Amino acid sequence: MYKNDRSGISEKFADELLTLNNYTILDSFAKAQSVLSRSRNAVVSLSGGSDSDIVLDIISHVDNVGEVKYFWIDTGFEYNATKEHLDCLEKKYNIKIERIRAVKSIPFCVHHYGVPFLSKYVSEQMMRLQAHNFKWEDKPLHELMQEYPRCKTSLQWWCNARYTDDKGEVKISRFSISQFKWLKEFIIANPPDFPISNKCCEYAKKKAAKGYIKENGADLDITGIRKSEGGIRSANYKSCFSHSKEKDCDTYRPIFRYNDNDKKIYEQHFDVTHSRCYTEYGMKRTGCVGCPFNPNLIDELNVIQKYEPALYNAAINIFGKSYEYSKKYREFRKKMDGRK
């Protein structure tokens, strides 16, 4: 069990931190020490990405007794460079990173549930609408609610439903379909003839992490989410610390307040090593190979084809329908913009 005198940083390292003159980084270490001192069984979820590397470096300096557990989820579709990087991290920090398998692999989920398209949230809403045999029609919300009474949330997304904020102003949610330019018009003109789903994220990552946390009786789950990432994932949190009822433990995000400049300063000062995905392939982010949610998908596919051709062929085979539909959407958007 952690106690206040068993987690912390040395005086030498504390002096080194002060030379940075960066409050965000200093604060992250102070909070990490405080949070870890109150935990009896902490685990760190590693992805092999750049944010994850910094989190590992922070925790390695704070965890004096080496009681923190580290794990990585093999989704069944990962870069070879990421797997190699995990081996390097184990040697560098003298730790053991447990490789755990997905509850259901990404290829399995895509085959049985559908392909991801554009974003997690878009995929979820389209999946729900497809489950109700939605006709992808442009009707008022109240009419669609009568026709599909058990699909309220997704219909609100489809109809750009408005809400009233704390100041009494009427606004459209930033997660409505209108946040993707011409998407509604595109879907109406080109209804998907294949199933769309976000289940690969749920079964390959979320459920696997939840299972690991439960099996190990963890009371603290440490992750590398940053607020500046944007999107649904970071928007779900208001601070670096929260309690997850789903996981039945606390969740701590050490670099939640880091912006890109803070990351750069940290990486340079503490000589943080990243995987070849960054240093050789030139990627700006990593994740599941060829994930259709990546806004820079075309660039990523070109990189995969060059450096990991076997995975490129697999990505085309697994996500091909989503790639084609996304390309068609981009062309439609360009055409509609040209009409203005």
Image (cartoon, grey):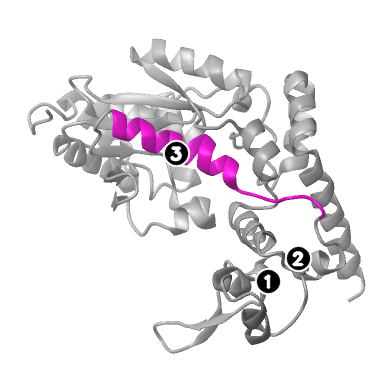
Q: Which residue is label 2 attached to?
A: 183
Figure check: 197 above or below 55 = below
82 to 45, vertically: above or below: above
Lower sequence index among marks 3 and 2? 2
Tag shown at residue 178: 1
Cα distance in 3D space between marks 1 and 3: 30 Å
Magenta stretch in the rendered image: 193-215
Q: Nearer the viewer, mark 1 or mark 3?
A: 3
Q: Is residue 64 left or right of residue 246?
A: left
> Residue at the location (73% across, 42% down)?
297
Residue 264 is at least partly visible in this image: no
Quadrant of the snapshot with the N terminus: top left
Instruction: Please give the label number shown on residue 274.
Output: none
Which residue is found at the position 70% from the left and 37% from the top? 111
Q: Which mark is residue 207?
A: 3
Asked if the residue at tag 1 contacts the one at tag 2, i.e. Cβ–Cβ closer than 8 Å, the answer is yes
